[in-house]
Structures are given as C-alpha cells and as structure tokens.
Image: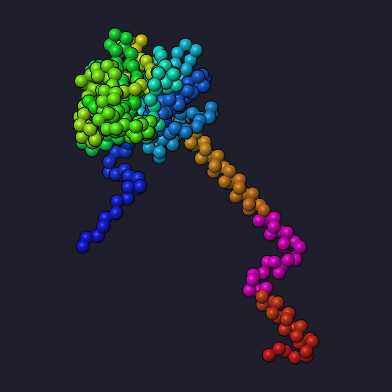
Amino acid sequence: RTRRKKKRTHVKEVEDPAKKGQPRSFVLRRGRHANLMKDLEQDLRKLMSPNTATGLKQHRKNVLRDFVHVAGPLGVTHFLLLSATEHASYLRVGKSPRGPTVTFKIHEYSLMRDVAQSMQRPRCPQQAFLHHPLVVMNQFNQEPHLKLVSIMFQNMFPTINVTTTRLATCQRVLLLEYSPETARITVRQYSIAVKATGVAKNLKKLLDRRGDAASLHEGLGKLTDISELMTKSGYGSESEGEEAEASKVELEQQGTKQSRIKLTEIGPRMELEVIKIEEGLCEGKVLYHRYEERTEAEVREKDDEIAAAKRLKAERRKVQDENVRKKQALQKAKDDAKKDKKERKKKEWWEKNGEGEEERMTKEDRDRARAQEDIEYYKQEVGEFPD
C-alpha cells in the first residue's frame, strides 16, 4: 500500500533562489507639473501589474535617491518616471540601479477610461491584471538606439516558457510598434478572449462558462426536441461567419478543437518618441540624442567635464567625512570632560561635608554595621549578648 501524496494547491509557488527573479517596477511622477500625469500614472501601474507597486505613495519632498535606496531590498529593477512641462509630457524608463535611462516624449495619450467610453462593448476583466501581459514588438530595426529600447522593453516583463505556460494566464497583450516614417512608438494594450468557432450560436452559449446562458436555460423547457436548439438561430449573423482564418487556432488546453482569438483594446494608448538615452539612472553620459549631434571633440570635452565633476564630488565627500569625524571626536572630548568635572565636584563635596559615610559604604559594610547595632541593642535591653 502506497502513501497518499498531498497536493497543496493553495500554497503559493516560491521562486527558485538559484534563478533570476522576475522584473519589478516603480511608476512615479516627478517634476513641477507632476499632478497632470496622475491618471496616466495609475493606468501605467495597471499595465505593469502584477509586478509593480500599485499602492506606492510619494511625497513632494521625496527625491529619486530615496526610491533607489529601497529598490534593492524590494527587488525593483526598473523605474518609470512621468513628468510634464508647459510644452510637453515625458516618460523616462530607467534600469535600476546603474542605468541606462531612455527618455520618451509623449506626443499623444488616451486613458483607459477614455478607451472604454469610445467602445460600444468594452471588455476589461479585472482578473486579467493578475498576470503579466504578453509583449509583441513590430518593426524595431537594428539601429543601435532602437535595439537598446527593444531590449529595455523586453526586460521590463517576465519571460515565458511556451511549453509550460498555462493559457489561462495569457489574458493581456502589449503591442509596441515602431513607425520609421514618424520615428514614433505606438503603445497599445489588448485583452485576449478565446471563443469557440464553427458551432451554433446557442451551443456557444451552453459552452460559455461565464453564466451568459442563464436566459437560454430558462427556455429549454419550451422545446419539444433538442434539435430545435440547434436549428432555431442557425450559425449566427453574417458578420460572425466572416471570421478571418488567421484568428482561428487549435488550442490543446481548451475543450474545443478550434477556437477564435478576439482582442479588445483596454488602453492606455500612447505615442512615444525616443528623445535621449543616458548611460546612468537619469544621469551620466548621453549615448543618443534625437535633436543634438556632437563632434568627437565635443564628446571628449563633455566626458572631461563629467569626470571632473565626479572627482570634485569625491573630494567634497572626503572633506565632509573628515569634518564629521572631527566634530564627533570634539563632541566626545567635551562629553568626557563634562563627566569628569561632575564626578570631581561630587567627590569634593563629600570630602568637605564628611557626611554620607553610609552612602559611600558598600552593601556588605552596611549589612555588617546594621548587624552590630542590633547586637548592642539586644545587650542593652536583655543584659546579655544574643546566642
């Protein structure tokens, strides 16, 4: 007889420490006009779900360094920083903690609620945000800056294993398309719906798991034969019959042999343009700029300025650390001198008054003196020493 093996399906899967962890992100608003980007910030957090801090709070006194310090212990790998000026809005995507950082100019954007209002039948299931989206990239050529941008976008989301990934987790897709004519990147997000194809419309309702067939179940008692259910409404409308062959696939994990993939946009929409790429996290050498070109002499001059600034910063840090050590040593000397003076005054006072001998005695001396007093008192009262 073999022992029954328990299957604890309610226990969350623990990541293998030997493997690289999943990428995580912070979505923040920075700058003077940051409040204008509040709604877009919330939509980006939903887009990056579930591997992002959806409830992250920030204060106007917080600086980027504060979030970088906590990013390491929390496993945060990327920063998405939204900012706005009087003329344009910007999105900076940086790799923590050492960069690089890609700066995009946001030419146009639409929020998730705007996309939903523009559709007659919007579809945005909340359980779709429990798993990361699939990333699809199109027309990213082999130019150095675009190659870096594509790698940055790919590393922002976890990789998938085609052989082991469950289809139930693939509920969103993120489309990134580069247009060589306008040099802009179009960002779209869609929800994925899988529906049976090639069957009667009423049979689709019976196979539907969402409970949309409740009205159909109520009318089954009025039928005289089950064939009426199949012949009553035929195979749907003409538009349903004109399904593209590319949308029909065979899914082994689904109950039907052939299914239809339907994409519904959920937003947000964005039109991005790569403006600048920096070597560090929002600082450092400029690797690419859209509107500025520099000669080799200007690049060397700028590198020399950056190196000089780093040396000056290191020297100032060294002087500050030395000054802190001197102040700490001086404060310690003052505290010791004050303590010695207090002890000396206390000793002089006891020597001058000659009182308080019992306080200066040790515990054993005090106990011995009290015992002697008790013996003398007993002799005076009784007339003899105690036994």
Q: Position of residue 79 (x, y in %)?
A: 40, 28
- Tell me which segment is drawn in magenta: 343-366
Side of 364 relative to 284 (left or right) = right
Q: Decide whether residue 355 is among the magenta residues.
A: yes
Compared with residue 98, is residue 340 higher up or lower down, i.e. above or below? below
183 and 248: which one is in front? 248
Q: Main secondary structure of the magenta part?
A: helix
Asked whether residue 39 is in view, the answer is yes
Q: Quadrant of residue 96?
A: top left
Quadrant housing the C terminus: bottom right
Q: Position of residue 374 (x, y in %)?
A: 73, 81
Identify the residue at image location x=34%, y=22%: 264
Asked whether residue 152 is in view, the answer is no
Identify the residue at image location x=67%, y=69%: 361
Q: Position of residue 386 (x, y in %)?
A: 71, 88
Side of 164 relative to 152 (left or right) = left
